Amino acid sequence: MSETCKSCGHSLCARRVPIFSHLDGEQLETVVSLIRRKHFDKRETLFFEGGVLQGLMIINRGKAKAYRHTADGKEQILHLFFPGDFFGEKSLFVDKKTEYNVAAIEPVDLCMISRKDFQRLMKDYPHINQKIMEELVSRIDHLESMIENLGAKSVDARIQSLLLELGQKALKQEKLEDGMEFVLPLSREGLANYIGVTRETVSRKLSALQEEGIIEMTGNKKIRVLDVDRLERT
């Protein structure tokens, strides 16, 4: 069996997604046969707030952000999507308008499975339901952590926690180790919007972490973690 999605020409979308990881080769081919692909350029909107998603959207290549605007018009980033991540899971069960936008922060290849097709998958492969629930619980945990960070943690702790989170996602690591390098998916402004601080504060803290020998920066976005233990002391 070829493990290339004929619809998108990239690595098999289904194999990247945790909810499909338990399926065998033949079952994965069934999933792939249902996938439809769409490409989005950097900064292009994948989905607008107030719309109703009609299925599951899988990030096959690239990165995207879910965001909305606050009452004063500022952008608040709610979630970052990396390859293998998905959104639209609520649409599989209910018709409900979304409360966020999704935009590409770099070129994105999106793989889509319609609600009707996905509901058939859930019936044929019940284990997918459990994986969906696990992912939803993980996202609730993430949102609760964000709220805790905004309300209880110091600015320094928020920024350090963010670097650990982004490094783990970028490198697909449970835990970072000294010497690991990764590229920040957001600008200084984007990082600030994600954790509720100013761009100047983010720049100042990153410079301080570099001076302390905890990280090493190359340009604006590439970071090497020199001392994970100190970065984790939040």
Image (spheres, rainbow, N blue to C red):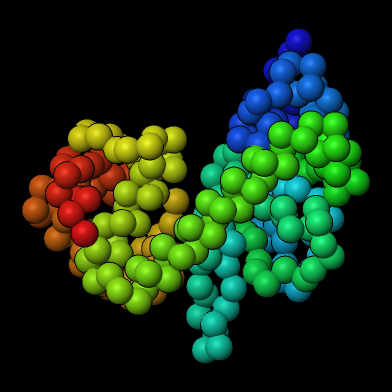
- Taking 25 as reference, is 224 left or right? left
Evaluate whether residue 189 shows in this view: no
168 to 152, vertically: above or below: above
- Taking 114 as reference, is 24 left or right? left
Residue 68 drawn at (x, y percent): 59, 73
33 to 42, vertically: above or below: above
Residue farthest along the top direction in this orientation? 1
Residue 229 drawn at (x, y percent): 17, 44
Evaluate whether residue 147 shows in this view: yes
Residue 168 drawn at (x, y percent): 38, 42
Quarter of the image with the N terminus is top right
* Quadrant of the image occupied by residue 154: bottom left
Quarter of the image with the C terminus is bottom left
* Quadrant of the image occupied by residue 187: bottom left
Residue 205 drawn at (x, y percent): 21, 64
Q: Kindly identify the residue that appears in the image at 32 percent across and 52 percent down.
A: 163
Q: Nearer the viewer, residue 89 or 72?
A: 89
- Taking 59 as reference, is 9 left or right? right
Q: Nearer the viewer, residue 140 or 2?
A: 140
Numbered label tally: 0
Q: Kindly identify the residue that appears in the image at 20 percent across and 43 percent down.
A: 228
* Quadrant of the image occupied by residue 132: top right
56 to 192, vertically: above or below: above
Q: Kindly identify the residue that appears in the image at 76 percent across and 48 percent down.
A: 56
Residue farthest along the left direction in this orientation? 212
